[in-house]
Image (spheres, grey):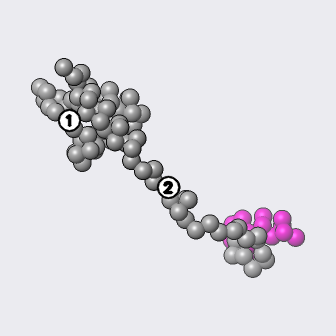
Amino acid sequence: MDNLLSVRQIAYMLKVHPLTIRRYIKEGRLKAIKVGGNVRIKETDLQAFHKALDEAPVQQSIILKAKKTIARPFTEIDPLLRLNGRGASFISEGSS
């Protein structure tokens, strides 16, 4: 017989928030059952879920997909150096 684990226990094991586990259950990614009004996950279902996560292709981060640009140096026509108002005296004093 499989051990039944609570949402909180699974969240602790996977190092995610319990609401994330509930979202996985709602989306159908993780099987769960109700026992006495409480949500429980079988240990075998957790192992299958974990195995599916390991086998899923790793998505590249958005940063890696973004076009890499080379930083440009500041120039005198840069809007940041042409500030008016509060703090403008600090910039103009430093650039003099």
Taken as a whole, is the magenta stretch helix, strand or loop? helix
- Which residue position holds label 2? 60
The answer to which image quadrant residue 35 occupies is top left
Identify the residue shown where x is 58% and y is 68%: 67
Residue 36, placed above or below residue 52: above
In the displayed structure, would residue 28 be above or below residue 68? Answer: above
Label tally: 2
**Which numbered disc covers residue 75?**
none
Q: Which residues are magenta?
A: 81-96
Mark-to-mark CA distance, 1 and 2: 30 Å
Please check the rendered image and state whether residue 35 is part of the magenta-colored stretch, yes or no: no
Q: Position of residue 11 (x, y in %)?
A: 35, 32
The residue most toward the bottom is 77
Element type at marker 2? loop
Residue occupying the far left of the picture = 36
Q: Nearer the viewer, residue 22 or 28?
A: 28
Vertical placement of 25 versus 40: above or below?
below
Left or right relative to 26: residue 16 = right
The tag on residue 32 is 1
Point 24% across, 21% down: residue: 3
Q: Amino acid at mark 1?
A: Ala
User: Where is residue 1, by image quadrant?
Assistant: top left
Q: Can the viewer see residue 6 in this picture?
A: no
Does label 1 or label 2 sit earlier along the sequence? 1
Q: Who is closer to the viewer here, 92 or 54? A: 54
Residue 48 visible in the shown view: yes
The image quadrant that residue 71 belongs to is bottom right
**Residue at x 39% of width, y 33% of height:** 14
| Circle 1/circle 2 CB separation < 8 Å | no
Q: Quadrant of the C terminus?
A: bottom right
Residue 72: x, y in percent? 73, 71
